Image (tube, rainbow, N blue to C red):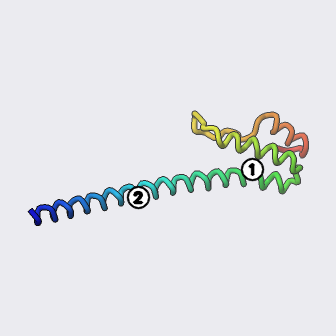
Amino acid sequence: GSNTERVIDLVLSVALILFMGSAISKISETLAEIRTMNEDRARKRREIRLPLANQNVSFELISRIMHFVDYKLDRPSLAGLDTSLLSGTLRMELFSSHGRP
């Protein structure tokens, strides 16, 4: 009896360790995916914000544009393609305020 119980305890302990290792691995993978998504989002925001700031676009217009960019980035795209982060209205206003998009 005693040896059988030890073997069962050992097998259960190894199985639990393997299960916990697998769970920790999945959590680590998920965190890495989230980090990558956040870095991609931050990169897209920088790609929009920096040229606007360098062109001396008003703070108010940059704020409105970035608010719209955040809205677009938060919406899941059905096609998965990022065709445009700005609405036509914001593009026209930006164009009219600086003569170029």
Residue 47 locus on image (x, y percent)? 72, 53
Number of residues whose C-alpha sits closer than 10 Å to that of mark 1, classed few (under 14), some (14–19) or many (20 or more): some
Residue 26: mark in rendering: none
Q: Amino acid at mark 1?
A: Ile
Element carrying mark 1: helix
Q: Which residue is mark 2?
A: 25
Residue 74 locus on image (x, y percent)? 65, 42
| Residue pictured at 86% horizontal, 53% vertical | 55
Element carrying mark 2: helix
Number of residues whose C-alpha sits closer than 10 Å to that of mark 2, classed few (under 14), some (14–19) or many (20 or more): few
| Rendered image quadrant of residue 71 | top right
81 is higher (above) or lower (below) than 13? above
The nearer-to-camera label among 1 and 2 is: 2
Residue 48: mark in rendering: 1
Q: Earlier in the sequence, mark 1 or mark 2?
A: 2
| 14 to the left or right of 76 | left
| Rendered image quadrant of residue 42 | bottom right
| 70 to the left or right of 95 | left
| Residue pictured at 58% horizontal, 33% vertical | 78
For this orientation, the residue located farthest to the left is 1
| 77 to the left or right of 84 | left
| Residue pictured at 60% horizontal, 38% vertical | 76
Query: Viewer-proximal residue, 43 or 63?
Result: 63
